Each structure stands twice: as structure tokens, then as C-alpha cells.
Amino acid sequence: MPLTAFQALPDSSRLWLLALDQPARAEQLAPDMETLLGRWRHKGVQYTGAWALLEQRILAVAEPSLAAQPSGCAIDGMLRGVQQLVAKAGMDLADPSAVLVRLGDGLQAMPRSDLEARLLDGTLTADTPVLDLALLTLGDLRGGKFQRPLAATWIGRKFKLAMGVPAGL
């Protein structure tokens, strides 16, 4: 996963991971993302964010000062800007409550209401890779916490799954 866009930022940088509803190319988003982050300021504070497109579906934005001194208004402004530029590119953000899983045919956003049925029918197993869009820091992303087996997530705890054990419920 190319994280070179973030190499100048510390591990403590605040991170936002937003799933797109369809695959995209970084070149599609680059001009608008650069403009958005270049003018990202609130109440006289200029933010120094960086971004990357992961897996052609996950827009990652990181900023170092918002981890220590959060500004809800600055964050909301950035997120609104991202929504607008994604719409301008003819895309949408995926439902933020959906669970992103890696299946044989690629990434799939799965509604939480479908999880139990997908476990029962074998689509999902304890070993299914799940992408964690709730990571808070760039260090978590760099540290390999972005993708974990389903059994090691809240889903595994909810459905009492153990690694290597068939779901069966």
C-alpha cells in the first residue's frame, strides 16, 4: 500500500478513511484534493494535510495538528469538501456504516444488517479480511491495523467467532 504521500507526517497524525462507492484513479481526484487541502484553514489556522487513494476505493486524509488540537469545524469543512469533489467526479461515498470486506472478487461494502446472513451462508468466515475505516492515526495505518481477519474485529466479538473456526453460528 503506497503511503509515500504521508512520509513527512508523524505517526500521531489524525487520519480519516472514506470509502468510495466504486473504484477510482488517484488522477481523477488529485487536482481537487490538492486544491481542497491547500486551502484547508479555519479561524486563521492553516492545516497541512496529505492524502492518498488506497486500494482504488479508500480516500485517506491525514493531518498532524488535528490530533492534538481538534477542530470540529475544520474537520467538518474538509469532509464536506471531500463529499463535493467526489460528487463532482461522478461518484459517491459508500455508506459509512457498511463493513468493507475483501472477497474473491475484490472489495465489497456490506450492510451491517446482512452480516449474520453472510456468515450463515459462508460468504463471510472468521478469516475474511475486513478493512477498518475507523483507524484514528496514521501510525495505526502504517502499523498494519488497516486490514484484519473478521474474527479479530467487533464482528468476531459480536458473533463469537474464533480464528480458523467455521462461522456456522
Image: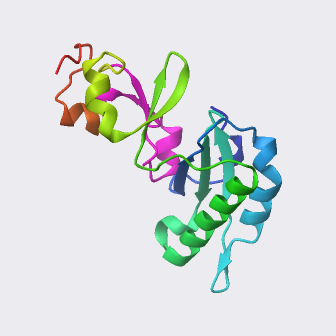
Query: Is residue 59 rendered to the left or right of residue 131?
Result: right
Q: Is residue 130 above or below residue 42?
A: above
Q: Is residue 107 above or below residue 97?
A: above
Corner quadrant of residue 40: bottom right
Query: In the image shown, does 149 or 140 lie closer to the viewer?
Result: 149
Query: Is residue 49 rendered to the left or right of residue 148?
Result: right
**Coloring basis for residues:** rainbow
How many marks overall?
Answer: 0
Picture quarter with the N terminus: top right
Query: In the image shown, does 64 or 1 lie closer to the viewer?
Result: 1
Q: Is residue 151 above or below residue 41?
A: above
Residue furthest bottom as drawn: 43
Rendered location of residue 113, percent (x, y): 31, 39
Does 78 lie within the magenta span?
no
Rendered location of residue 139, percent (x, y): 50, 46
Examine the rendering and report whether any part of residue 71 can be seen: no
Rendered location of residue 79, percent (x, y): 59, 64
Q: Residue at x 63, y 86 (%)?
A: 43
Examine the rendering and report whether any part of residue 116 can be seen: yes
Q: Residue at x 73, y 49 (%)?
A: 90
Query: In the image shown, does 125 or 164 lie closer to the viewer?
Result: 125
Q: Residue at x 65, y 59 (%)?
A: 82
Q: Which segment did they paint magenta?
A: 127-152
Does 138 lie within the magenta span?
yes
Picture quarter with the C terminus: top left
Rendered location of residue 106, percent (x, y): 55, 23
Corner quadrant of residue 24: top right
Corner quadrant of residue 73: bottom right
